[in-house]
Image (cartoon, rainbow, N blue to C red):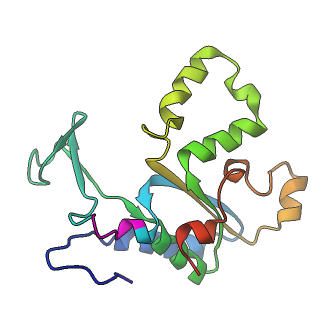
Amino acid sequence: KLPARPAGYETEINLAALDWIDHLSAKLERGYVLALDYGFPRDEFYAPYRTAGTLQVREKHRQLASPFEQIGHADITAHVNWTDLAERAESHGLRVAGFTDQHHFVTGIISEFPELVENQKTKRSLQTLLHPEMLGRAFQVLALNKNVDPLLATTVGVAAPLAGFKFAREPRAALGIC
């Protein structure tokens, strides 16, 4: 589902992530799956201005220009196309139960369980995780479930919808799934 792009446009396709969803959906009989990582919904992942893809190479907290620098010592990573993962999950019997950024996810949890952040040290630690210009919007959270009855989930103490998605948009709309 790669949209038409100009000559020279580069991107990554993560077939291993799709295989992971296939394996996961075959093994999971009932329950939830939370996936957290850097990434974008499809429209943003393939944005016309993202001409060099999302590949990043880092070594000792500094970004390198090429995956061929510091071979064996640098970490090579690419962002997740969350829409592809969600569509693959749905095609294999999983349901998209939530999608949001880390800021909204953690804020939703804290709003349900404020005692988690009663001390100042914890509050300061959360600033990096929550701040929109730091990690708050860099990471996203995708929740999938299979054979979960929302009414049963509330009776056993699991918030329905999951507390982390309290402030999230409707997940399929946020992912651009029609």
Residue 135 appears in which quarter of the rendering? top left
Q: Residue furthest front?
A: 49
Is 123 part of what is drawn in magenta?
A: no
In percent of the image, x 85 and y 48: which residue is there?
Answer: 157
In percent of the image, x 47 and y 31: which residue is there?
Answer: 128
Quarter of the N terminus within the rendering: bottom left
In percent of the image, x 70 and y 28: which residue is there?
Answer: 116
Residue 101, percent across and down? 54, 51
Question: Which region shows up in magenta?
Answer: 44-49
- 54 relative to 18 in the view: left or right: left
Q: Residue furthest left?
A: 69
- 131 relative to 44 in the view: left or right: right
Residue 176, percent across and down? 53, 73
Please name the predominant secondary structure of the magenta segment in the image.
loop
Residue 172, percent across and down? 61, 71
Residue in the foreground of this view, choosing between 19 and 46 = 46
